[in-house]
Amino acid sequence: MSLPPPLRPEGPYHVCFVCLGNICRSPVAEVVARAQIDKAGLAARVTVDSAGTGDWHVGHRMNSGSRAVLASGGYDGDAHLARQFDRSWDPDLVLAMDKSNLKNLRALYRADPGGQRDGSRVRLFGEVAGLGDAEVPDPYGGGPGDFAEVLRMVESAMPSLVSQLAAVATQPRE
Ligand code: 4NP
């Protein structure tokens, strides 16, 4: 299934990665995606950010396990501050890191009072990025190996996602 078309005729294609707390998984996906998007020369065409479905960690820095594993891979997660997904946002593509967050995001879209939200823009990260229906497991409270597994999954999935983003973000718009 191809990625949903851009919502807006101008401006970059906006992807938001979403997990529960926005301190472990989705910020890792955001940082890795941004690095690969930059490398692919797509920085002006695709913008990425991240959020959590929960509000417990709003304003907090990335979990130290995520920061450490990112640093070990040559990335920098220091600038991240956690946010909660806001129902007024309307990204071109919302990628949930697991099925529970996918379900919660879809419910949020269905509950939109204007009824204008397109729930098909909310997808499972692993499914879109070629990992089948694999979920990125929650590493919160886990050890370095759990965070390493998050980075491994995210990095292995990202080339497929970036090539799909290149296709959708460079197609002619109305
Ligand atoms: P994340 O991990 O969703 O990958 O950011 C978690 C962070 C916090 C909690 C659970 C998962 N928590 O229960 O506070």
Image: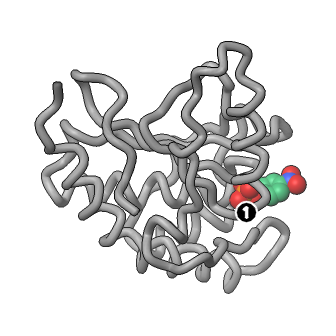
Report which quarter residue 64 is drawn in.
Answer: bottom right
Q: Is residue 81 left or right of residue 166?
A: right
Q: Residue at x 24, y 48 (%)?
A: 168
- Residue at 54% across / 52% down in the picture? 95
On screen, residue 145 above or below 70: below
Relative to 129, say whether 167 is above or below: above
* The quarter of the picture showing ligand 1: bottom right
Residue 77, x across and y down, in percent: 50, 53
Please tell me whether residue 75 is drawn above or below residue 104 in the rendered image.
below
- At 62% from the left and 49% from the top, the residue drawn is 18
The answer to whether residue 63 is seen in the rendering is no
Q: Residue 170, position in %: x, y? A: 14, 44
User: Residue 42's spot in the image, x, y percent?
Assistant: 18, 48
Q: Respond yes or no on whether mark 1 lies under 8 Å from ligand 1.
A: no
Q: Quadrant of the C terminus?
A: top left
Image quadrant occupied by the N terminus: bottom left
Closer to the camera in the image, 103 or 101:
103
Q: Which residue is mark 1?
A: 99
Left or right, 108 with reference to 174: right
Residue occupying the far bottom of the picture: 145
Residue 32 spot, x, y in % from top left: 41, 61
Q: Secondary structure at mark 1?
A: helix
- Nearest the viewer among 86 and 174 is 174
- 153 or 143: which is nearer to us? 153
Instruction: Examine the rendering and report whether any part of residue 74 can be seen.
Output: yes
Q: Is residue 49 left or right of residue 122?
A: left
Which quadrant would residue 84 be assigned to in this image? top right
Residue flagged by tag 1: what amino acid is it?
Lys
Number of residues whose C-alpha sits closer than 10 Å to that of mark 1, classed few (under 14), some (14–19) or many (20 or more): some
